[in-house]
Image (spheres, helix red, strand yellow):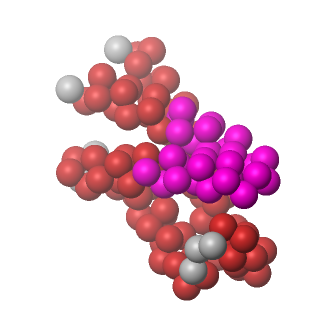
Amino acid sequence: MKTNKIIYYISTGLLTAIMLFSASMYFFKHDAISEAFKHFGYPTYIIYPYATLKLLGLIAIWSPKFKVLKEWAYAGYFFAFILAFFAHVMVNDGQQGTAIIAFVALIVSYIFNKRTNN
């Protein structure tokens, strides 16, 4: 059981670091992110709400009280990482590595969350 918790905390910590870095880029490097969103063909008005949702997802994942919200956060991140991966592949910018790492951390975190809390 202790090994499962260690794996859960490491993977969730990695996921948290990636999401905090991403959200901070969205808030503090808005011009660069805005250009990237335009390059992807995304509307730029979603940058701040998307960053806020990333942070709220982290709160849901780390909180033991919000079991249903935690499931929704994991699902939201799942789709966000899949879409981010393919967005980077489609524009051929070579930046899909972070999406892969985040996706793997998400899956490991989800699996070990289930193992430690059930």
Horizontal arrangement in the rendering, residue 27 relative to residue 13 (left or right): right
Q: Position of residue 55 (x, y in %)?
A: 48, 63
Q: Give the prevailing secondary structure in the magenta stretch.
A: helix
Residue 91 in the image: state x and y as whole percent. Answer: 72, 57
The residue lying at 38 percent from left, 26 percent from top is 112
x 49%, y 62%: residue: 54
Instruction: Report the quarter where the C terminus lies.
Output: top left
| Residue 99 placement, left or right of 33 | left
Q: What stretch is highlighted in magenta?
A: 79-105
Q: Can residue 87 be seen in this view?
A: yes
Question: Is residue 99 a member of the stretch shown in magenta?
Answer: yes
Q: Which residue is outermost to the bottom? A: 45
User: Vertically, is 115 above or below 92?
Assistant: above
Give the vertical position of 103 relative to 95 (above or below). above
Residue 12, position in %: x, y? 49, 39
* Residue 33 visible: no
User: Can you say whether 51 is above or below 85 in the image?
Assistant: below
Point 60% across, 65% down: residue? 23
- Which of the pair 99/66 is nearer the observer? 99
Instruction: State the residue in front, 62 or 48.
Output: 48
Q: What is the quadrant of the N terminus in the image? A: top left
Q: Does the magenta stretch include residue 62?
A: no
Picture residue at 37% right of the left edge, 47% below the top: 74
